[in-house]
Image: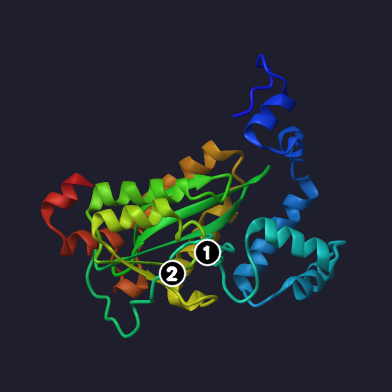
Amino acid sequence: MIEHEGTLTVKRQCELLALNRTGVYYLPRPVSDADLKLMRRIDELHLEHPYYGARRMAKQLRREGFEVGRLHVKTLMLRMGIEAIYRKPRTSIPARLSSIYPYLLGGLSIDRPNQVWSSDITYIPMAHGFLYLVAILDVASRKVLSFRLSNTLTADFCVAALEEALHRFGKPEIFNTDQGAQFTSEGWIDTLKNAGVKISMDGKGRWIDNVFIERLWRTVKYENVYLHAYRDGREAQQRLSAYFELYNGRRLHQSLDYQTPDEVYFGACSPTLARAA
């Protein structure tokens, strides 16, 4: 928006656009290697102990030899988008003026593909830096229908993953998420409405309502992310693509009676859909 090499001065451009010059000149500081190491360990501890707040997390980290205080741990957790009780990025704050939809899965028997899809976002550590991962999951088959990586928690990468899943696999009857800003955004809601999908949202702070994708995050991190210190976003994309291909097509799932998600999903869907995917 602002052209630093334009004919108008930056000051004049800010005046015309009613922008504060402080935000234009500000350059974000990169995350230090020490903080990245801390964030990686916080992410691991958060998966194991989702009820740990900043105070207890700091005490645990000090037991492990990290010299860190509660306020710094709190700052890092906010940056990662996580907080105590539920294992997920802090997306339970709806966008301003957004609509909240009722939870539709209570007492519902989910027993067929494309009946219910679910989505969530998680933090992905790398050797230098971090990313956010969103995935679209078919609940009945546990199949990962699409995913996207982003270095910010904006809604656009979530909408892109949703559009890909709808294009490749049709539409679900119900789509369930938390009340996060990405999932209450205009782009997300309009995409679901235009596709004729019923929208369901978890109760505030109830990670258990979206437990299926929470289990996916734990599996992905322990079986892939923590085993490979991704050098950059390109490697993260490549390794996660390969892992989700294995997860869908070759990894046996005990909850599916030792079938793969692809076997369950395509076994109940039409051959035409299987060929298209």
Figure check: 71 above or below 2: below
Residue 170 in percent (x, y) is at: 22, 54
Label 2 sits on residue: 100
Q: What element carries label 1?
A: loop
Q: Label 1 sits on what residue type?
A: Pro
206 or 24, which is in the foreground?
Answer: 24
Q: Earlier in the sequence, mark 2 or mark 1?
A: 1
SS state under label 2: loop
Q: Residue 115 location, x and y as percent? A: 24, 68
In-front residue for pair 40/173: 173
Disc 2/disc 1 C-alpha distance (Å):
8 Å
Q: Name the residue under label 1.
A: 94
Q: Is 185 displayed left or right of 62 in the figure?
A: left
Label 2 crowd bin: few (<14), some (14–19), many (20+), radius 10 Å: some
Residue at point 31% right, 51% down? 165
Tag 2 and tag 1, C-beta contact below 8 Å: yes
Image position, residue 109 (x, y; %): 27, 81
Q: In this view, does 135 lie above or below 58?
A: above
